[in-house]
Image: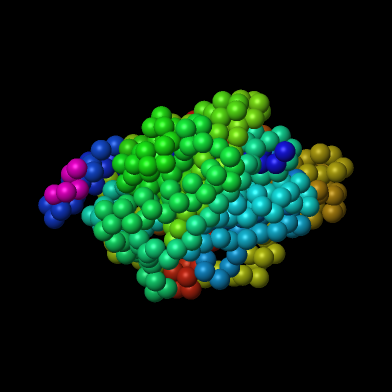
Amino acid sequence: MFGITAYGAYIPRSRLSRAAMADANDWFDTSLRGLAKGERSVCNWDEDTITMAVEAGQDCLSLLDASSVGALYLASTTMPFLDRQNSVVVSQALNLGDHLRTMDVSASQRAATSALIAMLEAGSSDKGSAMLVASEHRRSKCGSRAEMLWGDGAAALGVGSDGVMAEYLGCETYVTDFVDHYRGEDSTLDYEWEERWVRDEGYLKSVPLAVSRLLEKAGVKAGEIAHFVLASDQAKTPPAVAEELGISAEAVVDNRIASMGVSGAAHPILMLTSVLEAAQPGDLIMLAGFGQGTDVVLFRATDQIKDRRPKTGFAGALERRRPDTNYNRFLSFNNLVERETGKRGELDKQSYLAAMYRKKDLLTGFIGGKCRECGTIQIPKENYCVNPDCGALHSQDDYPMSGLPGRVKTWTADRLTFDWNPPAYFGLVEFEGGGRLMMDFTEVEAGSIETGVAVSMHFRIRQFDNQRGFRKYFWKATPSGQ
């Protein structure tokens, strides 16, 4: 048996009220008021496609042995780097080692479903498992329909033959150069076509064709489908497609537009994780991805579907939220306005690539050291053990620390130091079992930081080097329980 063995999800905590967005823009377009229901997920200033992918991947690895992962695919249309393999950054932040295949899959809203099909059709990797991470952080024009309906998010799937929770039954792909939207090489924002035309000529023709082919090939009737995932920011389109096919209305999976928005290429996989939490053994699950055609994949839930649950999962990620009504902050975080940052914000942030490479185990993998002689844990890893009663030379074994809880020993809130979301919080963190490090804190709510507060580690953007188009990543501490 071969299929899905693990899953994970991540949705940024910040949820921006759509009413606040409409309040800021309906003076120009009154139709936005009709979309002003619920909220959308919003990346913090130090989050992007890579950082969300790491979060989703970590959640997936709570069910999957990292040493078994032989391939990592990253699917997105919003990769931070055009000529640097983004999936390698994700793999090293997840400490998956250096003996695996990595690949970036992009350029279509069905990038994630296409990558999943490639993994499923290839079969088990040499080391036993493969991981797909789909992540999306899309920018849109101010006051647009897309701005109201989109959201940020990421999801991960493990694929293999050990511990299968959803058996792979088959797939089908229909391709056609149907351009519902596009983004050229010199653009940062999508150009979209008329909504009704996209529905009638796109979804209602492409998806039924691909689904019908798969149902015939698999010998399955449309009425037998228990869960039908079709990502779309058009709320009425998935039910219309299902009706055309004869799939029951109850099988159509809610795209959660009201509670988070549609997360682009990542959304089919993110909605699939919500199905994996709710499905019963024997349920048939159909996943569709739309974009220049349609991908369709069919699964059957196994008896293990109830026993394998990630640490957070979709429900946990959706529940972990912080309401926000500050539309201007959203514009600033997405670089949609030119913000005055002051002189301290103008400092050169040049990236010294040689030094970054030498320190990659610490900067990306958050690897410390554990002394073989006395067991002392320290970060950074150094030549000498920091224990004054030991001091052994070259006695440090690699010790991953990204998953370790910590506690705040000292902290500062500084409004003189530049930060995209002032004040800048930083301080000394002591890790469970040993090791201390001065760190930045992120997503701190007023009053949530005190000495002794528990914190968890999160891979985030440290600085933007805007002069050279580079961004630096490192780990930050976040108060636990937020």
Residue at 64%, 30% (x, y): give it. 302
The scheme the figure's colours follow is: rainbow
Please determine whether, in this image, residue 21 is positioned above or below residue 320. Answer: below
Q: In the drawing, does residue 324 fall left or right of residue 33?
A: right
Residue at 34%, 44% (x, y): give it. 237
Please determine whether, in this image, residue 93 is positioned above or below residue 59. Answer: below
Q: Is residue 137 visible?
A: no
Residue 156: x and y in percent read 57, 45
Q: In the drawing, does residue 469 fall left or right of residue 457?
A: left
Please determine whether, in this image, residue 441 is positioned above or below residue 356. Answer: above
Q: Is residue 232 visible?
A: yes
**Quadrant location of the N terminus in the rendered image:** top right
Asked whether 472 or 380 is in front, the reply is: 472
Q: In the drawing, does residue 240 fall left or right of residue 35?
A: right
- The boundaries of the magenta stretch are 30-34
Asked whether 142 or 246 is in front, the reply is: 246
Residue at 56%, 25% (x, y): give it. 280
Q: Which quarter of the figure has residue 418?
A: bottom left
Please determine whether, in this image, residue 72 is positioned above or below residue 443. Answer: below
Residue 98: x and y in percent read 74, 58
Q: Is residue 31 magenta?
A: yes
Q: How many marks?
A: 0
Q: Is residue 281 magenta?
A: no
Residue at 78%, 40% (x, y): give it. 376
Please name the predominant secondary structure of the magenta segment in the image: helix
Asked whether 331 or 341 is in front, the reply is: 331
Asked whether 440 or 272 is in front, the reply is: 272
Residue 479: x and y in percent read 50, 36
Residue 13: x and y in percent read 42, 40
